[in-house]
Amino acid sequence: MGPPRSTIARCRSSPLCTASAWAATSAWSANADVVVASDDATFGLAEVDRGALGAATHLARLVPQHRMRAMMYTSDTATAAELHRYGSVLEVVPRAQLRDAALAVARRIAAKDPAVIRAAKQSLNGIDQVDVKRSYRYEQGYTFELNLSGVAARVRDEFRRSGPGSGTTARPEGA
C-alpha cells in the first residue's frame, strides 16, 4: 500500500438511491478528507428499519451527536445544505457543476507540496478522536447479536410488508 492520499468525495442524489446507497454514501463521504455535494444530495442511515446497525461511526463524522442519534433512531436523512451548515460538506453546488467543483478543490490540494500533504494526511489520521475501524466493528457486533436473536429477520420482514416510510416496525408484546 502506498502513502496516504487525500480524498475528495463528490456526492449527488440518484433516482435509484436506496437506503443501502444512503449508508454507503454517508460512510464513504465521512471518511473522505473533503466533501463536495450537489444540492440534491441526501445522507442518512436506514439500518434500524432493517434490523441492523453499523454506520453511526461514519455518520458521527458528518453531523453533531444528537442529530446523528435522531437520524439513526428514525432513519431520517439530512440534506447536503444541512451538512454544509455543520461544516461537513465544503461546498454545495448545482448538480451540473459538481464535477468541476470537486476538481477545483483537487487542483488546489495538488498545487501544494506532495510530501507536506502526505504528512498532513498522516497527522490528521493520527489525531482522529475515534478509531473508525474499531468503532465500526463494535457496532457490527450488535448487528450480529440482532441476527442471532432473530430480531433482525423479524424487523426486515415487517419492513418488507409495510414498505419504506411507513414508520411501522413490529415489536414484541410489552416492548
Image: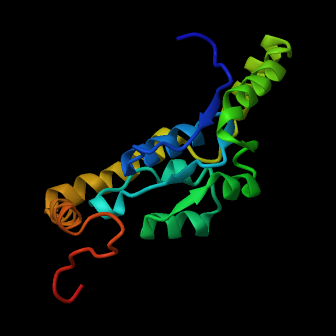
The answer to which quarter of the image holds residue 155 is bottom left
Q: Residue at x 79, y 12 (%)?
A: 115
Location of residue 136 in the rendering, given as x and y in whole percent from the top left corner? 43, 46
Q: Is residue 47 left or right of residue 96?
A: left
Q: Is residue 85 above or below residue 67?
A: above
Looking at the rendering, in which quadrant would you find the C terminus?
bottom left
Q: Residue at x 62, y 33 (%)?
A: 10
Is residue 33 among what the camera can see? no
How is colour applied across the structure in the image? rainbow
Q: Residue at x 64, y 19 (%)?
A: 4
How many marks the image carries: the answer is 0
Q: Is residue 119 left or right of residue 47?
A: right
Task: Answer yes or no: is residue 98 visible.
Answer: yes
In the foreground, 112 or 79: 79
Rendering quarter of residue 6: top right
The x and y percentages for residue 74 are: 44, 70
- Residue 138 location in percent, x, y? 39, 50
Instruction: Give left or right: position of 100 versus 16.
Output: right
Check the image and report above or below for 6 versus 171. above
Image position, residue 119 (x, y; %): 76, 20
In the displayed structure, 148 sits above or below 166; it is above
Spot the residue most to the bottom. 174
Q: Residue at x 20, y 89 (%)?
A: 174
Horizontal placement of 100 versus 143: left or right?
right
Nearest to the observer: residue 54 or residue 106: 106
